Amino acid sequence: MNWQSVKFDWNRARAFLVTAEEGSLSAAAKALGVSQPTLGRQVAALEEELSTALFERGGRGLELTRNGLELLAYVRAMGEAASSLSLAATGQANSIEGEIAISASEITAAYILPPILQRLRYQYPGIRINLVASNEASDLRRRAADIAIRNFRPTEPDLIARKVGEFSATLYARPEILADLPSPLTDGLCKAPFIGFLSNNERYVGALAQRGLKLREEQFVARTDSHLVHWQMARAGIGIGMMPVELGNAEAEVERVFEDKVFGGDVWLVSHRELRMNLRVRTVFDFLAAELTEYFEPQK
């Protein structure tokens, strides 16, 4: 009989495999954690589906028929493949290799990901990383990246996402800028120099207005769409700029302007549903999920 042309339920095949290895239905049922009648029905259903007897009762319990012996080789190979896939999918395989494209914002790509990617390379030295640093969302449906880190949850049905944390961003400036401002700072900040954005600065102005800071156009002494350049301008003392709190709080050259956050939200790890079936993508996705969850966990 040509077993390779047969399609059958893996649960039935596993029931047959364990029964063959244990030598009895009772022992196999115990090993699988199911009742003996349930296991017996699965084996019987497989025999019916294949139109052949797989076992015969002998003096020492169940014995495989010739067809059963032939089938056992194929099912055992399936079991080994399933076990290998399970190990690899949970990051326990060390043979993951090839290119992986990861998309993230400039700040995430420059400040957060490098040490995480170093650990990824240490665990999987065969991985080659293409890091797309952009503040625009990569089109995963057109394979612009394999995995993306975003500050919004995707709505496309062919994308899958996992929340890995929450972010907060607020204002920072060099001490000499803040020294001449009156108290409370929320009043004085309305007369201070700010660094804005070339595109969509209205959203930034609106967010600041909700925090009590109503700015005039002339207060934006510099603008850029690069978040990295924006931050370097703030560090240089050109004006007040914005940064995620865990990075801004760690910068010795600037001071936090006030405790309230200007922007905040969730951080999502996203991939195309089809790509998650790829072992390399799934392994890196799960690795990044664990690392980013740990990174964002202590954030206030």
Image (cartoon, rainbow, N blue to C red):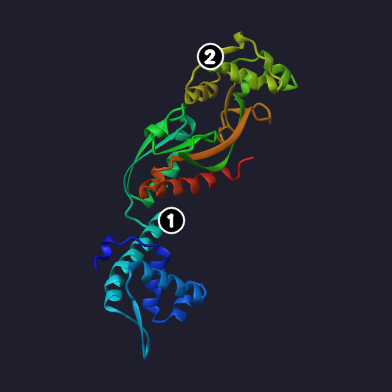
Determine the secondary structure under disc 2.
strand
Quarter occupied by residue 93: bottom left
Q: Is residue 274 left or right of residue 71?
A: right
Q: Which residue is label 2 attached to?
A: 222
Camera sees residue 232: yes
Q: Residue furthest bottom?
A: 59
In this figure, which residue is indicated by the disc labeled 1? Answer: 90
At 60% across and 34% down in the image, what residue appears?
265
Vertical side of 66 occupied by 165: above or below: above
Foreground pick, 57 / 34: 57
Left or right for 106, reference 294: left
Q: Residues within 10 Å of mark 2 (few under 14, many from 20)?
A: some
Q: Residue at x 36, y 62 (%)?
A: 8
Name the element at disc 1.
loop
Query: In x, y percent, where is residue 9?
Result: 40, 62
Q: Amino acid at mark 2?
A: Ala
Whether residue 215 is situated above or below residue 272 in the rendered picture: above
Label 1, label 2: how far apart the Cα atoms are: 47 Å
Q: Earlier in the sequence, mark 1 or mark 2?
A: 1
- Under mark 1, the amino acid is Thr
Identify which residue, 3 or 106, lies in the foreground: 3
Mark sitting on residue 292: none
Q: Residue 282: x and y, percent?
A: 41, 48
Q: Can you say which quadrant of the picture contains the C terminus? A: top right
> Given the current orientation, which residue lies at the most extreme right position?
184
